[in-house]
Image: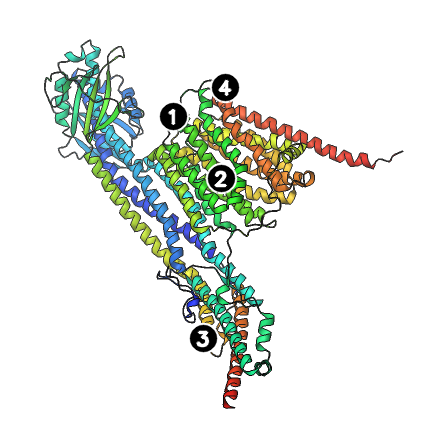
Amino acid sequence: MFKLRVPIRVSMMALAIFSIIISTLFISFFSLEYMERTLAPEMHKKTVTIGESLHGVIEKVVGYGAKFESLNGMDKYLAELKVEHDDLSYITITNKYHEPLYQTGKPHGRLKSTTDDFSGKDVNTSLVEGFYNTSLVINNGGGGVLGYIHLGQAKGLIQKRLQDSLLDVITVVVVSILFSLELLYFLMVFTISTPVASLKKLLKNASDGDFSHIAAIEARDEIGRFTNYINSALYKLNDRYYSLTERINTLKFSFGEKKVSSSIGGYIDTATRINLFTPPECMEKVSTELTMYIRPALFLLIFSESLSLSFFPIFVQELYEPIYGLSREMVIGLPISIFMLMWALSLPSAGGWSDRVGRRKSFLVGAVITTIGLVLTGLSQSIYDLLLWRCITAVGYGIVFITCQGYITDHTNASNRTRGMAMFLAGFFSGSLCGAAIGGILADHIGYNLTFILSGVLSLAAAAFVARFIHEHKDYEKPENARKAKFSDYMKVLSIPRFITLTLFAAVPAKIALTGFLYYTGPLYMSTLGTEQSSIGRIMMAYGIAMILISPLIGKVADKAKCYTLLIVVGGVLSTFALMVLYFESNLVGVLISMTLLGVAHAIGVPPQIALITEISKSNASEIGVGKAIGIFRLVERIGNVAGPIISGILITVYGYPGAFVGVAVITFIGIIIFSLLFALFNFRDRQLPDLLEEPVE
Amino acid sequence: MNNKTIEDGDYEDEPLTFNNKRDIGLVIKLSLTITFVISFAVFLTAFLTYFNFSKAYSEITQARYAVLGGDLKKSIEYSLNIGVNIDELHNAQVLVNELAKKNSDIDVLRILSANNKILYDKDKSGVAPKQLEIKNGHLVAGTNYKMIEKDDIIILRMPIYNNFSAQVGELQIGYSNQQTNAYLWGTKWFLLQHSILSISLVSFLVLVSVYFITKKFRFRLVGMGSALRNLMSDSCHDPDEVTEKGNFEDAYLVFHEKTQELLLSFDAAEKDLDKLERNNSDV
């Protein structure tokens, strides 16, 4: 019979997701029920107060001699009252025979029955057809009944009021699931995959006759215990071998070599010939550290840095002070540009330093610098403080970023480096997505400053993680082209027409759209629309989700069809559309569509850029090396990161938000058109060249 | 460090390295990780729910006092519109007293002049004008009044305008924050209790599930471990105890066989040496 075998890792992930959903549903259900119970009486009190206020107005007007049945402007007054108190579904005033005289909203058809049982009270509330109906008696001066006031509130109003809370909960569930997948994946690798891999390596060594190693596993679980048994066995074998050898030597001394050798046969000789033993005290440890080890730390650090993504421009706006020669919008964009610039500048030197001091130390230093930068950013008092603290954060972030890339290079080879880098990118986007979403919610509730301080604490947690789990290895193989890029390498690579075309007209505009729109104009624009921070974060999530879902698919398609140029063009055109959407749909839905489309566009157009750069470098700059060429490409494309907020700031100043969106769209469009034309020209020229060479010479 | 190593000599039945900390099995380790993530999700949900609740509760409570204050403000503005100065309103003190009497939960109810002097106050009839310290407060969204909290009392500050839309005074209506605080405290406690309950229940289910999910894997490890231990301690070195095959198990079986082979060689050599020694001592 066919038996489905689900790996433990998959089962654990499924269990974690299921548990998170169940537990959050449980707490959400009881919280909602509690809130309904607690808020309903308070809402009722408020409704009664509104009813009494209305009652007072009618009493006063009727007291002045107006006729109750024909109060001029009462419908308008009720409509205004309903607008002021939007939780009221209807307000109806009836005569004493329950015939409606004035009304606003949608009253239900059973008002009469609700006034039947006042039992001596002037106010009565009952649940009728899904509405809490509050009725008040309007008396005339002589104590007789003139009519009734009815105010209705929908029963599900509290749920509706707590809709924001529900969206927050959904965001928390999504982020918790991503967070748990990161954590569990690491734990599974750390507690099961890596020890099992180390043990396999050890067992393989022993099976091949090498008994000179033991496994370096310190876990105190079933695997740890099993490892101890294996290690004990290996120690015992080595110990027995050496004690036997010692005994043989003693006996040889006493009885002569020939006699002893003939007595024990060839046992020991055979064992020595085909196996490798070592004195127990000299046994070496076998350890396997995987690329995966760095991912939770990277995730945590990117998560902490991204907590401020959704509100950073708004935070800068609060600290705004004029800087000579710069418009308000440019000043607000300045901290993002400075951050990007410092980040880009720190990468080359940070990379070299990380190679020298080791990954563990450089990550720890980088994370601590990031922590200091983030905490001080939260405590900024002026725009100048902020610029300084952002510089510090950018340097720390740059060190960590390049260290993680270096770690992956150290622990991978040519065959699995792409997979390692994909893992790096997945961790990056996952952390960025979760951070933006949670950061918005946190900022709404605890404020910007505390959110920054929390970011700092999380960054420190990333450092603690590395301190605990990452060990310094001096023996990793350095990649072949580990030598730093020289000025001549830059000149050589940047003089390749295809390389410079791709960098300037496809990669740089993509980065301008990323920082100029997603990180700067987008959040600021949503804030001007009166959007809450938590919603800004949620909308920004759309970009990350689109990237995470689509880029792996595109990666496969691109590798198979080798249609990198086409995908870059499609991505560029789609980016233009994404930004133009906001010109026609200038509201929150427009921003959501725009950010989602930009995510899709970047998922289609950005990954093939690296593949194309690789191909260009292989055929035009093989002596420099692909790795170095990619490094130069990465550095140059960051011009876009720096320029994005500055360009957007200028465009907002001159043309306003719609103009800024169109402006960035135009830059992207012009870029992609030039890219397409030039690449078509290069391809045409390449096709012509062999024909010319093949022409017979007369 | 309490670590003890093979060099101390007693490796046969003891783990190679051990310390005084208790072992944590895979089940506990994995369950704790999932519980940690569940706790993160539940506490974050509870935290956000609490904030949304406190916001909703404060807004609803505040809206009621805003209606009461708004009615009084309208009455005063009506009198101002017929040309009476704010400090000469004959019925203002009566209106203040009436509203305060009907709503005993109002702690502060007063009308101030534009230069911040109390003109009418619920606590005193015909008060002598005095300067008041309350200033600022944040603007309540969607309204033109400000809110400030002072000595556990929430005060709504509503501007009073004359016919020409000039601000001539201010109405202040305040209520105790104690009831709100009591409700919020109750909410905190409720959410904490339910969060712990939710985490405990789900964690128990997780523990049971992890036990069953990892059962086969753990049992294999234990089986292989005990087989190896028996191999190292038995004199017959029987390898048949480990029969279940898998990728990892295959590697282990080869190791087991190889170890057995070596041990048999060592045993045979030892016996031969014993025999040699015995024969020589007899001679």
Indicate which disc residue B233 carries. 3
Is there one chain holding both mark 3 and mark 2? no
- Extreme residue in the top direction: B83
Say which quarter of the image contains residue A204.
Answer: bottom right
Q: Chain of mark 1?
A: A
Q: Chain of mark 3?
A: B
Residue type pointed to by label 3: Ser
Q: Residue visible at 46% across and 39% down?
A: A432
Counting from the top left corner in percent of width and height, residue A225 is at 43, 64
Q: How far is mark 1 from mark 2, CA to CA?
A: 26 Å
Dot 3, crowdedness within 10 Å: few (<14), some or many (≥20)? Answer: few
Q: How far is mark 3 from mark 2, CA to CA?
A: 53 Å
Dot 4, crowdedness within 10 Å: few (<14), some or many (≥20)? Answer: few
- Mark 1 — residue? A382
Q: Nearer the viewer, residue A305 or A430?
A: A305
Q: Are marks 4 and 3 in contact (CB under 8 Å)?
A: no
- Mark 4 — residue? A655
